[in-house]
Image (spheres, rainbow, N blue to C red):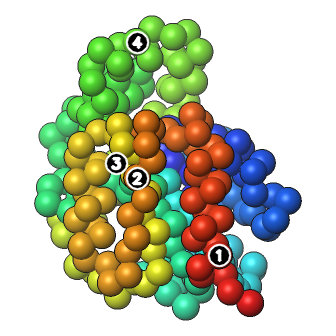
């Protein structure tokens, strides 16, 4: 399950390290399919049902992988159909463990989007919701390729920020899930690592892996490291 702000293709580098040894299925999340018809309010329950349906088609065992908001959707799917998944591998799910993810910033992003300024909505998302330092956000948005790539995904990105907040604060609901691997980047925003630590404290069998020198986009900057972590997890949970 790919992260927000892009599509399943963003994980292509990781997949190339795995396909010789595993069957790898990337789900194109429905709100990021083009052209997407996003029914508001969007719900993580919709994505959970999509994941469960794919798992039913694949049969077992399935190692469910999720990155960022895709990891939130993966958690929702595991709650919906726990028997469908042999294990979970989750890279920095932005869960509302102690506070909402978007909150007031989400309202400002929605206003910008509805006002016809998707770039401003994405700028608010990156700086005030993901909490990437402003200098880095400005640098990203100065890149013409980034400026062209981000607006098409803005409607989906803001909709899923709202869907995550709609889950409400608290994560005790996940305490029944087993065999998770939790992945964090050493350089990721502090709040994402704090939320991951909160989740690890609730899950009964969590293993936290820290990617040295990486942030929230290691699927782009270090695909081999993510593939190695996935192999380790697969060896534990996908036993014959």
Q: Read off the residue under disc 1.
A: 235
- Whichever of callouts 1 and 3 sits on the residue coming sooner in the sequence is 3
Quadrant of the image containing the C terminus:
bottom right
Image-based side of 12 in relation to 72, left or right: right
Residue 111 against residue 83 in the figure, above or below: above
- Whichever of callouts 2 and 3 sits on the residue coming sooner in the sequence is 3
Quadrant of the image containing the N terminus:
bottom right
Q: Read off the residue under disc 2.
A: 210
Q: Nearer the viewer, mark 4 or mark 1?
A: 1
Q: Secondary structure at mark 3?
A: helix
Q: Which mark is residue 161?
A: 3
Quick one: label 1, few (<14), some, or many (20+) residues within 10 Å?
few
Q: Looking at the picture, how far across and down is residue 226, in whole percent?
A: 58, 51
Q: Looking at the picture, how far across and down is residue 39, in whole percent?
A: 47, 54
Q: CA distance from mark 4 to mark 3?
A: 23 Å
- Whichever of callouts 4 and 3 sits on the residue coming sooner in the sequence is 4
Image-based side of 185 in relation to 105, left or right: right
- Whichever of callouts 1 and 2 sits on the residue coming sooner in the sequence is 2
Residue at (75% x, 63% y) in the render: 24
Residue at (71% x, 44% y) in the render: 12
Q: Read off the residue under disc 4.
A: 139
Q: Nearer the viewer, mark 4 or mark 3?
A: 4
């Amino acid at each position: 399950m790919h992260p927000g702000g892009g599509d399943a293709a963003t994980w292509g580098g990781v997949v190339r390290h795995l396909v010789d040894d595993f069957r790898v299925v990337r789900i194109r999340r429905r709100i990021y399919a083009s052209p997407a018809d996003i029914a508001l309010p969007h719900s993580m329950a919709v994505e959970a049902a999509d994941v469960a349906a794919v798992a039913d088609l694949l049969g077992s065992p399935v190692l469910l992988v999720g990155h960022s908001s895709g990891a939130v959707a993966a958690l929702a799917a595991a709650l919906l159909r726990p028997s469908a998944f042999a294990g979970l591998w989750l890279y920095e799910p932005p869960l509302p463990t102690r506070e909402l993810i978007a909150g007031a910033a989400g309202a400002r992003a929605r206003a910008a989007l509805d006002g016809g300024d998707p770039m401003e909505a994405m700028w608010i998302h990156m700086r005030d919701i993901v909490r990437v330092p402003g200098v880095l956000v400005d640098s990203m948005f100065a890149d013409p390729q980034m400026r062209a790539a981000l607006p098409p995904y803005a409607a989906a990105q803001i909709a899923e920020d709202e869907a995550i907040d709609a889950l409400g604060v608290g994560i005790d609901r996940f305490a029944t899930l087993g065999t998770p691997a939790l992945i964090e980047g050493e350089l990721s925003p502090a709040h994402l690592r704090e939320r991951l630590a909160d989740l690890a404290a609730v899950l009964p069998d969590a293993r936290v892996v820290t990617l040295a020198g990486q942030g929230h986009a290691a699927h782009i900057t270090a695909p081999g490291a993510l593939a190695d972590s996935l192999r380790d997890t697969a060896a534990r949970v996908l036993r014959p």
